[in-house]
């Protein structure tokens, strides 16, 4: 049997050369104050075991990892209809590109770039009775941690510096791809991004993607097996933006990153993984995080191909 504990314990040494090589996201000022040398990783296996190393129990800003949870919840309620308003192609462009949205007449390339997530947020505003509370409940129940909360400081920090996301939302609205007001959509979107969770929370909360959509703690499905497969596919092709090819090549797992330095990854049938280290490479994905995943896959031989 693979000794996951031992493998995890070898990772801080494997990523040490990459600490100090990236740069924290500072366009959201609250994220810049997180110590750069943090590193944590958690595994949550399909049969319910947890393994952790380093700062895996420390909460951090999940940022765009929230896009996995919002898409899953939107697909749960609205099914494949969501893909009438957002595409499934890799963007090959930065996550907040305005140019691409203009070019594609207001239909975002995929649900994992910001424009796509704003459309998914709009779908959720139509499906949920109390969006902010319902989304928080969803993530809390998936992770089994009722203490998870929105970080108001991060929320306000992003809201005060939201010019580009506001531009994207206004564009979407001008192309009639938002039903709700720009301010309602932005408000809920920034709350999703401000969620504070640990690697352990995120690994548990995304375990359904490794188990054909089964809820980790309830006798029900979060999404159907086909939907789980599709979300994993989108993570593989679009989850790390214009670095998705590099991730597929070097890591070989469905991954979704956030500018808080977290990356969630799935090994279908086996486990979900979350790694966190705040310094990002040029494309906005955690640099030590990517190398930790690469080392993990090399040591376990568990890539999907
Ligand atoms: N809240 C961030 C933004 O909208 C999320 C981006 C990310 O994590 N890649 O810019």
Image (tube, rainbow, N blue to C red):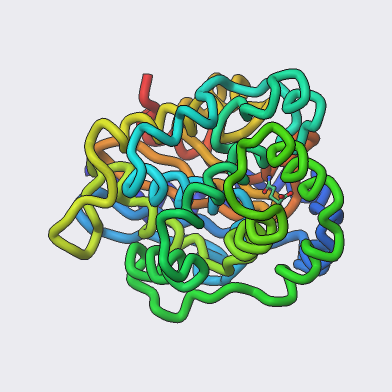
Q: Quadrant of the C terminus?
A: top left
The reply, left or right, for residue 259 in relation to residue 250 is right
The reply, left or right, for residue 110 in relation to residue 229 is right
Q: Residue at x 80, y 35 (%)?
A: 282
The reply, left or right, for residue 213 in relation to residue 17 is left
Q: Residue at x 36, y 30 (%)?
A: 230
Question: Number of labelled discs?
Answer: 0
Whether residue 39 is visible here, answered yes or no, is no
Residue 206 image position (x, y, % from top left): 38, 52
Q: Residue at x 77, y 60 (%)?
A: 36
* Residue found at the very far left of the displayed protein: 219
Residue 6 image position (x, y, % from top left): 40, 52
Q: In this view of the protein, which residue sits in the foreground, 210 or 134?
A: 134
Which image quarter: residue 277? bottom right
Q: In this view of the protein, which residue sits in the foreground, 58 or 68?
A: 68
Whether residue 110 is visible here, answered yes or no, is yes
């Amino acid at each position: 049997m693979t000794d996951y504990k031992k493998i995890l314990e070898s990772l801080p040494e494997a990523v040490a050369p990459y600490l100090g090589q990236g740069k924290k996201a500072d366009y959201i000022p609250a994220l810049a104050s997180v110590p750069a040398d943090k590193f944590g990783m958690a595994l949550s296996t399909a049969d319910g075991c947890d393994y952790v190393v380093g700062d895996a129990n420390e909460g951090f800003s999940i940022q765009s990892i929230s896009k996995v949870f919002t898409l899953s919840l939107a697909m749960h309620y609205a099914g494949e209809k969501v893909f009438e308003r957002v595409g499934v192609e890799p963007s090959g462009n930065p996550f907040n590109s305005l140019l691409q949205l203009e070019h594609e007449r207001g239909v975002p390339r995929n649900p994992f770039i910001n424009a796509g997530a704003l459309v998914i947020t709009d779908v959720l505003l139509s499906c949920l009775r109390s969006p902010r509370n319902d989304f928080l409940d969803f993530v809390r129940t998936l992770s089994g941690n009722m203490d998870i909360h929105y970080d108001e400081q991060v929320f306000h920090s992003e809201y005060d510096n939201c010019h580009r996301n506001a531009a994207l939302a206004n564009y979407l609205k001008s192309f009639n791809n938002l039903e709700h007001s720009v301010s309602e959509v932005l408000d809920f979107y920034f709350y999703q991004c401000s969620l504070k969770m640990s690697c352990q929370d995120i690994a548990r909360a995304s375990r359904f993607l490794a188990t054909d959509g089964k809820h980790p703690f309830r006798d029900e499905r979060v999404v159907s097996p086909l939907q789980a497969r599709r979300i994993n596919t989108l993570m593989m092709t679009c989850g790390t933006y214009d670095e998705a090819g590099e991730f597929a090549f070097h890591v070989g797992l469905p991954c979704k990153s956030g500018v808080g330095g977290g990356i969630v990854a799935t090994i279908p049938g086996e486990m979900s993984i979350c790694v966190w280290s705040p310094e990002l490479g040029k494309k906005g994905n955690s640099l030590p995080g990517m190398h930790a995943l690469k080392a993990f896959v090399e040591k376990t031989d568990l890539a999907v191909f």
